[in-house]
Amino acid sequence: MRRMQTSQPVPTALTIAGSDSGGGAGIQADLHTFSFHRVHGTSALTAITAQNTRGVTRVDVLPAAAVAAQIDAVADDFRVGAVKAGMLVNAEIISVVAWRLKSLALAPLVVDPVMVSRAGARLIDDSAVGALKEHLLPLAAIVTPNRHEAELLAGVELRTLEDMQEAARRIHRLGPRTVLVKGGGMPGDLRGVDVWFDGERMETLYLRAVKTQNTHGTGCTLSASIAAWLALGHDVLEATRRAKAHVTTSLEHPLSLGKGPGPFSHFSPLGEPG
């Protein structure tokens, strides 16, 4: 049988993030998402976590030089159409990642600022937050903080839509070209309402809210989906709209896995197997 070869280059995206042994978030979720969008996924691991649906039991952080070497290896051999940066752990890794992305001219960059969990647990220290603001956000085509991350970056408490809009304005002043303040952790009718801002245009993005406890990896999947659509040639707002629709559809297909809040299906829109 003759092998079929495509005459078109395959879009490629790079994810720089941690590994989730449970497969619901991090590198694993990003690569699932890239594949669903028919984008080839490459990766640079920053940390290895031992975790499942009930929690994280161990985190082993890779040396910053090892992270840089992975980025260099990918950039040396692949035409990277978009980059997603997730769990970068500490100030040293954040600074090195920003240095390599800038030196190699890898763009557009989607930053999922993994700083605070949806439940409000702080994940990185003050020096890492400072490095993120100083070195990485100015390189970002879009940054996608959740409610608590937006509060930390903007220095304002989020309770209303107007609060979300003000946070978007303040975060935009830190240097990213666009900001998406996510409303998944907002109360009442604001749950699931996101605010998108590019310095001039303020958009309120809303799709149907999905009631499920299986939301593990939602932020990773959204930012990876945005990166995939950017690699496919869409502008930032259109990529965001499409990514939000993808996540909403996926949330409607939770997986019966594990004993705690689990992941959702990254492949459900493809239909049933077989």
Image (cartoon, rainbow, N blue to C red):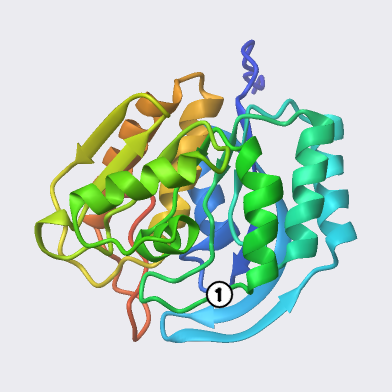
- Where 82 falls versus 209 (above or below)? above
Q: Is residue 36 visible?
A: no
Horizontal side, residue 47 vs residue 243: left or right = right
- Where 229 falls versus 171 (above or below)? above
Horizontal side, residue 206 vs residue 111: left or right = left
What residue sits 71% from the left and 67% below the top? Answer: 90
In the rendered image, residue 113, in percent from the top left (x then y), is placed at 54, 56
- Where 194 falls versus 197 (above or below)? below
Q: Nearer the viewer, residue 44 or 31?
A: 44
Mark 1, Cα crowd under 10 Å, few <14 / some 14-19 / many 20+, is: few
Kindly identify which residue carries mark 1: 123
What residue sits 19% from the left and 56% below the top? Answer: 160
Q: Nearer the viewer, residue 97 or 46?
A: 97
Considering every residue shown, the one lying at the far top of the view is: 7
Q: Secondary structure at mark 1?
A: loop
Q: Is residue 128 visible?
A: yes
Considering every residue shown, the one lying at the far left of the view is: 189
Name the image quarter holding the N terminus.
top right
Q: Nearer the viewer, residue 248 or 102?
A: 102
In the rendered image, residue 83, in percent from the top left (x then y), is placed at 63, 38
How many numbered marks are there?
Answer: 1
Horizontal side, residue 132 vs residue 156: left or right = right
What residue sits 37% from the left and 27% below the top? Answer: 237
Q: Nearer the viewer, residue 197 or 214?
A: 197
What residue sits 82% from the left and 52% below the top? Answer: 96
- Where 27 falls versus 175 (above or below)? below
Residue type, numbered disc 1:
Leu
The image quadrant that residue 17 belongs to is bottom right
In the rendered image, residue 112, in percent from the top left (x then y), is placed at 52, 52
In the rendered image, residue 60, in percent from the top left (x then y), is placed at 73, 78
